[in-house]
Image: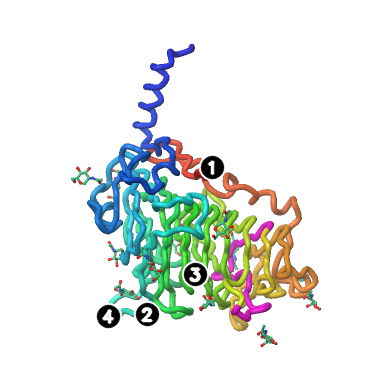
Amino acid sequence: MALPQRARASLLAFLLLCTGSVSAYNRAACQAPTRNPLEGCAKNTLLVGPNANFTSVQEAVLSIGNTTTAWTILILPGNYTEQVNVTRQAPLTLLGQTSHPNNASKNIVNIIWHNATGTATTGTYDNAYTSTLTIAPDFNASTTGSGTDGNPVPAGTPFGNENFRTYNLNFINDYLPYSAGPSLALSVSYANAGFYYTQFLSYQDTVYVGKLGNAFMYDCIIGGQTDFFYGFGTLWVTDSNIKLRGCGGGITAWKGSNTTFANKYGVYIHDSYIAKANSTLNITGECALGRPWNSQMRSIFSNNYLDDSIEPSGFIEWSATTPRITFNTTMAEYNDYGPGFNLTARLAANITIEMTAQEYAPYSTPAKVFQYPFSGAFGNVAWIDEHPHG
Ligand SMILES: *[C@@H]1O[C@H](CO)[C@@H](O)[C@H](O)[C@H]1NC(C)=O
Ligand SMILES: *[C@@H]1O[C@H](CO)[C@@H](O)[C@H](O)[C@H]1NC(C)=O
Ligand SMILES: *[C@@H]1O[C@H](CO)[C@@H](O)[C@H](O)[C@H]1NC(C)=O
Ligand SMILES: *[C@@H]1O[C@H](CO)[C@@H](O)[C@H](O)[C@H]1NC(C)=O
Ligand SMILES: *[C@@H]1O[C@H](CO)[C@@H](O)[C@H](O)[C@H]1NC(C)=O
Ligand SMILES: *[C@@H]1O[C@H](CO)[C@@H](O)[C@H](O)[C@H]1NC(C)=O
Ligand SMILES: *[C@@H]1O[C@H](CO)[C@@H](O)[C@H](O)[C@H]1NC(C)=O
Ligand SMILES: *[C@@H]1O[C@H](CO)[C@@H](O)[C@H](O)[C@H]1NC(C)=O
Ligand SMILES: *[C@@H]1O[C@H](CO)[C@@H](O)[C@H](O)[C@H]1NC(C)=O
Ligand SMILES: *[C@@H]1O[C@H](CO)[C@@H](O)[C@H](O)[C@H]1NC(C)=O
Ligand SMILES: *[C@@H]1O[C@H](CO)[C@@H](O)[C@H](O)[C@H]1NC(C)=O
Ligand SMILES: *[C@@H]1O[C@H](CO)[C@@H](O)[C@H](O)[C@H]1NC(C)=O
């Protein structure tokens, strides 16, 4: 049955309202610097800026609370020294104001924190305290913990944000300009989060995707030195610029966990440019693609350019005394290239699996590795922006 145009439009509006979907709007128009900064933005958009209603991102997030409608926060240029914690379940999008909505290297909104695990004088030392941005339903869900499986998340913990997004923001943990303990710029647990044209910078443990965390990064810049993609959850990075600011541990360090059932946990790095951060660094052959944080690590690099900073063996053991490489470890490549891809050395070391097309097939798309689309409180949530170009 064909509905009249207006009836169809209101039915669509009703469905969007019911599912808490992110409403359609022109992202570039909202982000463009204009006399009225909110010109071109979606209806439920708050403004953060040095002279705006909200002067910190966290104040704006808290003012929205745990409502069931989708919200957007537009952030004006500046340096915001704060931690941002997002616990709400309904969609939330953070936008940085910019004239270059498709180029992360031109972002002019910085959210900065400086802390590392081990700086506490009393009490707990979990990495969760250090992160610049955290997306998780509560503190316990966001902790890293220790041991083979990390902290068990208490039974009954609800899922957190089902559809969180950022565009054109830089999240920085600048504790010290070298590895000096876990210094998270991002932490995602029990939540779905997509990052577009976003930067994450620190030196150690920069990006954490924890228990039941699903994270997607497109055309981002991620800079780090030691184990700077780590976690238990599922992370897909594509079309991004991975800046090696030194070498330590591996680029990736993952744990298999019994908390991920429906999806294929692991870290998947695709179609990206992986190279030293600048020409003054002398790290030829020193950066490993990853090392097994536990013996069920899964890390797959596919179709990336690798500069000569990459270790000839590709992946490495956790350590000489605790190698942790077993038949359960999946540390693999498929179609990587560039001076950092030395097939002879890879095969001789026998640590990195060079996958065949058939072996790679089960991991070849976001839909295959994530539980996607996601079925949650807001229905079938397609939380990945498939058309991010603004
Ligand atoms: C500023 O805050 C007032 C009161 O909370 C609100 O009515 C108004 O919409 C806000 N304006 C912006 C630009 O966020
Ligand atoms: C933010 O900090 C950076 C580095 O300290 C500085 O170059 C930039 O001008 C600052 N931006 C603003 C808007 O103050
Ligand atoms: C948000 O609301 C949902 C639905 O009522 C609830 O399950 C969840 O625990 C709430 N989250 C927070 C952080 O309050
Ligand atoms: C992004 O900006 C940088 C710095 O100006 C420039 O080198 C680069 O070509 C730009 N990228 C795109 C895709 O326009
Ligand atoms: C820094 O992290 C430590 C955990 O190592 C925590 O105890 C402390 O409260 C944090 N400090 C700040 C200012 O966030
Ligand atoms: C964010 O969460 C961390 C860890 O619980 C906490 O130390 C920090 O105070 C929180 N910050 C804000 C602004 O809520
Ligand atoms: C090169 O990168 C390193 C690591 O981030 C940094 O310490 C150094 O200052 C950078 N050098 C230049 C010239 O940018
Ligand atoms: C996962 O393992 C931990 C101990 O490592 C256990 O406490 C927990 O019950 C297990 N969870 C499930 C769902 O099996
Ligand atoms: C880099 O270090 C290696 C080994 O220490 C040395 O042989 C080489 O000359 C250095 N290259 C540069 C450009 O400094
Ligand atoms: C390998 O995985 C199986 C099931 O997935 C598990 O029972 C076994 O303990 C794992 N072995 C190691 C060494 O992690
Ligand atoms: C590749 O690795 C092999 C074995 O380690 C080594 O002999 C060779 O020089 C390397 N090739 C290049 C181009 O680095
Ligand atoms: C490579 O390692 C696997 C175990 O991880 C072993 O079964 C196999 O024999 C090794 N191959 C070579 C050529 O050493």
* Vertical order, 341 against 156 (above or below): below
- First along the sequence among labels 3 and 2: 2
Name the residue tied to disc 1. 386
CB at disc 4 and ligand 5 closer than 8 Å:
yes
CB at disc 3 and ligand 8 closer than 8 Å:
yes
How far is the residue under mark 2 from the one under mark 1? 39 Å
Q: Classify mark 4: helix, strand or loop.
A: loop
The answer to whether residue 10 is left or right of residue 297 is left
Q: Which residues are magenta?
A: 280-303
Q: Which mark is residue 148?
A: 3
Amino acid type of disc 2? Gly
Residue in front for this viewpoint, 230 or 110: 110
Q: Which mark is residue 118?
A: 2
* Vertical order, 280 against 128 (above or below): below
Q: Position of residue 85 (x, y in %)?
A: 32, 58
> From the viewer's perspective, is the residue at label 4 or at label 3 nearer?
4
Amino acid type of disc 4? Thr
In contact (CB < 8 Å): disc 4 and disc 3: no
Amino acid type of disc 1? Glu
Q: Mark 1 packing: few (<14 Cα in 10 Å), some, or many (20+)?
A: few
Q: Classify mark 2: helix, strand or loop.
A: loop
Name the residue tied to disc 4. 122
Q: Mark 2 packing: few (<14 Cα in 10 Å), some, or many (20+)?
A: some
Give the image quarter of residue 312: bottom right
